[in-house]
Image (cartoon, rainbow, N blue to C red):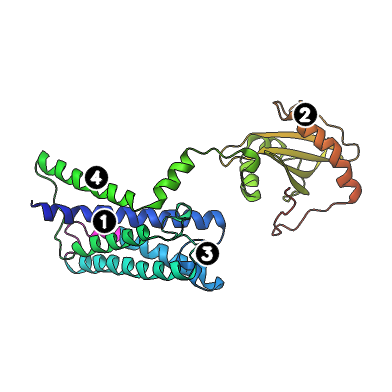
Amino acid sequence: MTMWHAIREVQIPLLATMLIAGCATKLLRMGRAAAADGRVGPTALFPMHLRRPVAIALCVAEGGLGIGLIVTAGPFGQPTAANCIRIGCCLLFLIAISALIELRQTRPDVGCGCFGDFSTAPVSGRTLARSALFAIAALTTYNLGPISRPATTAEVLRLAAILAAEMLLIAALSPEVGEGLVRLGYSEPCELRDVPTWRTLTALRRSKYWRRYADLITSDVPVDVWRELCWRYIVYPARYADRPAEVVFAVFLQHRRPVVHVALVDSSTGVALESPTGKRGSRGPGRAAVRRLANHLSPAFTAAGVQAAPADMPFSTDL
């Protein structure tokens, strides 16, 4: 195996990895933002109503081409299908270069969006050079036959060295590397943490405390939701011992497995009641805060005649 042939073979897994990673990070961004808002990437060049369809089409193209490179790396699809996919990759990166040049001229404050939320830095010459490198890499794979397994240890080491050198070059051309290192070394204070209400409600419904009090709750929709520093409080109407009550949940603001505390209070008096398990409220450092807020606010909710919001209405009572 010659050096040139080894360089060409390395481009297939490298391009496939980059395309699939770009697709995955874009999908993750769209899932977290609930919409492609166009704050990053060439979708900002399109009207608002077209940004989400364009972002989805781009994800499909990247994911499809990445998978296609892997499928046609062997004998399958040789040579016609393999060449079509490789030329498609080259065209995709050439189109990306044109879009990034336009984006740099019309929206210099917008990132390229190549890897979702990691690509928020404005488009620079490094970003354009990286796309050009990928286009050239895709072009070099045209008419490349099936990738063969290295026969000797020397060939394995040569392929690993080529891949490492190219990865270092891509890292040098990628602003996302610096952004990723900053994020790894930064721990956001919980008071500033942005956790959507829907995520808090989802985590709550998966907790043991929800299952413990679910039989008492009389509505699928909370009567109120508010935030205090690192905690989000959620009030559900309930009925306990043939009298109206309220279940107040306190959910710590973190994305995975948040701590949950709970208090059961009388709607008329605001007095904490015994839980179905025979304990008053919840155990732990958040118990006093839950009970104090529940006792203070529950009578006010009842006196004001607060009604449950419709199921499709977003909660906007967060502080």
Q: Residue at x 70, y 39 (%)?
A: 229
Q: Which residue is mark 4?
A: 164
Mark 1 or 3, nearer chain start: 3
In three-dimensional space, the C-alpha distance between marks 1 and 3, rounded to whole angstroms, equals 30 Å
Q: Which residue is mark 2?
A: 288
Left or right position of 111 against 165: right
Q: Nearer the viewer, mark 4 or mark 2?
A: 4
Q: Which residue is mark 1?
A: 70
Mark 4 or 1, nearer chain start: 1
Given the image, on which type of amino acid does mark 4 rest? Ala
Label 1: which secondary element = helix
Residue 196: x percent and y percent? 63, 49
Magenta range: 67-78
Left or right position of 283 against 266: left
Q: Are marks 4 and 1 in contact (CB under 8 Å)?
A: no
Given the image, on which type of amino acid does mark 3 rest? Gly
Query: Which label sits on residue 38?
Result: 3
Q: Residue at x 77, y 43 (%)?
A: 235
Given the image, on which type of amino acid does mark 1 rest? Ile
Q: Residue at x 27, y 53 (%)?
A: 14
Q: Nearer the viewer, residue 67 or 46?
A: 46
Left or right position of 292 against 75: right
Mark 2 or 1, nearer chain start: 1
Q: Are marks 1 and 3 in contact (CB under 8 Å)?
A: no
Label 4: which secondary element = helix
Q: Nearer the viewer, mark 1 or mark 3?
A: 3
